[in-house]
Each structure stands twice: as structure tokens, then as C-alpha cells.
Amino acid sequence: MSTPHILIADDHPLLRGAVRHALTAALPSAVVDEVASATALGKALEARPDADLVLLDVTMPGAHGFSALLHVRGAYPEIPVVVISSSEHPRVIRRAQQFGAAGFIPKSSPAEAIGEAVSTVLEGGTWFPPMAAARSEQDALLAARLAQLTPQQFRVLECLADGLLNKQIAHELGLAENTVKVHVTAILKKLDCHSRTQAAVLVKSLAPEATL
């Protein structure tokens, strides 16, 4: 890949700068864009759906833990996502993998490791630190349930998790209120939830170290 296009999604400017520096050293021809929120990431991907890689911080504004990872994987399944995180807990690494990440880079990693991880993923491989945490069947079930949602339904679900009413969701997403009602009904059915609150709790379980 002669000129890969990479998106760095993290709300810390210093971290983005360090990652950009590492990418420039490892892949001098790479085109690198930066965003600081889940909303900005969504807009950037709409503008560049042909991006080659997303480097994603799961704790940035607008994300509910791994929700941004799941959203990108659902809406743009051809774009690999590498999670960058301040946590090196084995369970966090394992959850990132189970939720569809192609790699995981601890923020404490040296620049050489970042370059190696990105190069490996761009070549079609995966890159994860050694993991001691066992695979979680609960996380696998959660990922499968969320994978049933369309990208628009996932956006509505995130709004539900923020406690927004249908009218507010309609305004936020530029939808008709009746359309939102239809989406909410479909979301609850697909997730096997009996209430909006139950669906919101499900989203909150996507926090990196949450347990179901």
C-alpha cells in the first residue's frame, strides 16, 4: 500500500501528535487525519469511506466505551480498527479483540511498536499484546446482538444511552420523530430488551473494564 490513509481518533492533542510522529517515521507516505470525538470520527469517515485504518481511543468524547469501535466495524466493515488505550488490562485487550478490533496498542508503547502494529494491520494481519484473559462468551453474545443493528439504529441506541427522548433524538440525528419511534422499537426487539433503560444499561456495559 503506497499511500495509506489513516485516521487518528483521540481527544488528547499530545497523544495524537506522538502517534502521528510514529506513523510518519514508519510510513512516510501515509496521509494522516486527526479527530477528537466520536462525532467527528463519524463525519470524517462519511467524507473518506475509503480510509485504510482507524486508530481509535475508546474513551474519547461521544463514545460509550467500545461503542465507537462497534459502530465503525458495523458501518465500515472493510476498514480495520486498532484500539489505542491507556489501559493494558488483559480483559480490556480481549474485549477489544472480541468486539472486532484488528489490533490493540497501549499508549505506553514506544514509537517503534506503534509503527510495527500499524504496518502489520495494513498488510492484513492483527497485532495484540500477549493476553491472559479468557474469551468471554457474554461479550461474544453482546457483540452478536449489537451486530444486528443498522448503523442508524446504533446511533439511535447511543442517544438512548445518553437519556435523550425521541423528540431530542430526532433533532440530534435529523430524523422524523416517527422514524425514531420505529428505530427504537426495532432496537429493543433486536437486543431483546424490554425498556429503553435496559437498552441504555446494555450500552454502558461497553465501558472498557465493565462486567456483564
Image: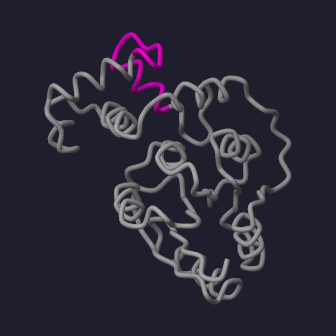
140 part of magenta stretch:
no
In the shown orientation, is residue 153 left or right of residue 58?
left
Quick one: 68 or 151, which is closer to the camera? 151
Quick one: 177 or 89, which is closer to the camera? 177
x then y, percent, for residue 96? 66, 45
Question: Which residue does the image show at 62% across and 28% down from the upper left?
Answer: 211
Choose top left, top right, bottom left or bottom right for residue 11. bottom left
In the shown orientation, is residue 194 left or right of residue 3?
left
Choose top left, top right, bottom left or bottom right for residue 49. bottom left
Does residue 32 sit above or below 125 in this rendering? below
x then y, percent, for residue 66? 54, 44
x then y, percent, for residue 156? 32, 35
Question: Which residue does the image show at 70% across and 45% down from the upper left?
Answer: 97
x then y, percent, for residue 180? 22, 29
Tell me, what colour scheme is on the image? one colour
Magenta-tinted stretch: 189-204
Question: Which residue does the image show at 65% across and 50% down from the upper left?
Answer: 101
For residue 85, say whether it is visible. no
Q: Chief secondary structure of the magenta span?
A: helix
Question: Which residue does the image show at 49% across and 65% down from the upper left?
Answer: 50
